[in-house]
Amino acid sequence: MRSSVAIVRCDDYDESRVLNAVRRALDLVGGIAGFVRPGELILVKPNLLAGDPPEHATTTHPAVFAAVVQLLVEAGARVEYGDSPGTGNPATAARKAGITAAAERFGAHPGRFDEQVELQLPAGNSIGAAGVPVAQAVLAADGIVSVPKLKTHVLMRLTGAVKNQLGCVYGFHKARMHLIAPHANRFGEILVDINSALKPRLYVMDAVVGMEGNGPRGGSPRKVGVVLVSADPVALDATASRLIALDPLHVPTNVVGHERGHGTYLQTEIDLLGDPLDEVVCSDFDVIRSPARQPLLTHLIFMKNLLEPRPVIDSDLCKLCGLCVDACPVPSKAVQFAGDDHSSPPVFDYNPCIRCFCCQEMCPHEAIRVRTPLLGRLPIISRIVRGGR
């Protein structure tokens, strides 16, 4: 079975241009009426990693979100929205990111992300449980439309359509996912399991301005100039990978999703519609281009600390906010303040550190970077650690 991905140019966030771009992209994949029926309750799921203003490129831009909501309302749907941010409460994050104001213009209401219900998972899932707690609004809706943001991600290389549904998992349970699966390949399996259980009907990616470098929060905004739309999250993420000249095989969710029959990353099985991909490729996009795979030596702590990438705090940029400490999912905390007065930056203990990079992901000051020790940067050592490739 073939998949379609629409690529439509959109040079900026002018609301009329964004609406026209999203409408055209949807028309290319069959039109909004093919994904929603009048009277249905649809949950629009943006990326609200944190309550950052739109110009930071941390979150789905409100203009793209508003276009999706408007078209759903025009199709007769009742619309709710929401996400579970990595820090803070959902209402505050949505307000600061401009999502609340955009929603109110079209009568969309916030979904219940302050209560949890159990999402049933298929037998043999990667989490090893019958279900996972998700926000009440997720299962109350008749369907989900996912509106991810194109951003880099240190662990997964790219955060896009598949990973966006991790925000449906309730509160601190997202951290538990990292403890269950601290390495990229296994974490990719969990992300695919959650996404396939939720089954969003449609994915609209905001790639007008993406985030490159130290993403998904501490990177730099980068104009890409397109909107991507597909009903296949794997095909969309694979196309987004090619858009930034990243090998789709280096993104674990692409590989796992394809292997489990939830989509395709193969270029020969994807029909690209709209504007030509080769005319919008950002070949110099700042993204980690090495494969994201489980290391071979993580059971040996001393070897892990000599060879494996690890988070490092820049003391000149650190504002002593402590969000890295709060974000660490390890019960004993792999990063902590040395004293009670919090007068100096937190300190890492790399022995319990699982290299999930949640600390780097949540730092609002670009103060945490991922560095590989000198020995681990040697080509022959790197090939051995990363699986012989």
Image: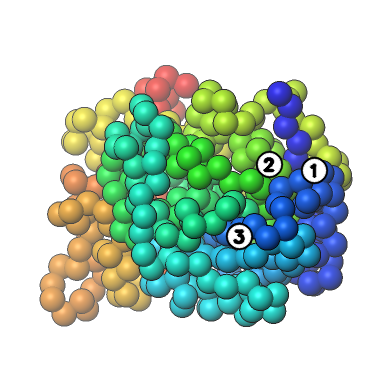
Residue shown at 38% from the left, 72% from the top: 88
Q: Are marks 2 and 1 in contact (CB under 8 Å)?
A: yes
Q: Are marks 3 and 1 in contact (CB under 8 Å)?
A: no
- Relative placement, left or right, of 331 versus 222 is left
Q: Secondary structure at mark 1?
A: loop
Where does the image place residue 67, in percent across and percent down from the top left? 74, 65
Amino acid type assigned to the residue bearing label 1 in the image = Val
Task: Calculate the distance from the C-alpha at mark 3 to the C-alpha at mark 1.
Answer: 21 Å
Kindly give the residue lying farthest to the front in the view shown.
Answer: 39
Q: Disc 2 or disc 3, which is closer to the eye?
A: 3
Q: Are marks 2 and 3 in contact (CB under 8 Å)?
A: no
Q: Quadrant of residue 268?
A: top right
Where does the image place residue 174, in percent across and percent down from the top left? 35, 53
Is 5 rendered above or below residue 104? above
The numbered dot on residue 328 is none
Amino acid type assigned to the residue bearing label 3 in the image = Leu
Residue underneath mark 3: 41
Residue shown at 26% from the left, 32% from the top: 298
Residue underneath mark 2: 231
Task: Give the mark, 2 or 3, whose residue is nearer the N terminus.
Answer: 3
Task: Give the mark, 2 or 1, whose residue is nearer the N terminus.
Answer: 1
Instruction: Kindly tell me whether residue 23 is visible in this rendering.
Output: yes
Task: Give the mark, 3 or 1, whose residue is nearer the N terminus.
Answer: 1
Residue underneath mark 1: 29
- Relative placement, left or right, of 49 versus 363 is right
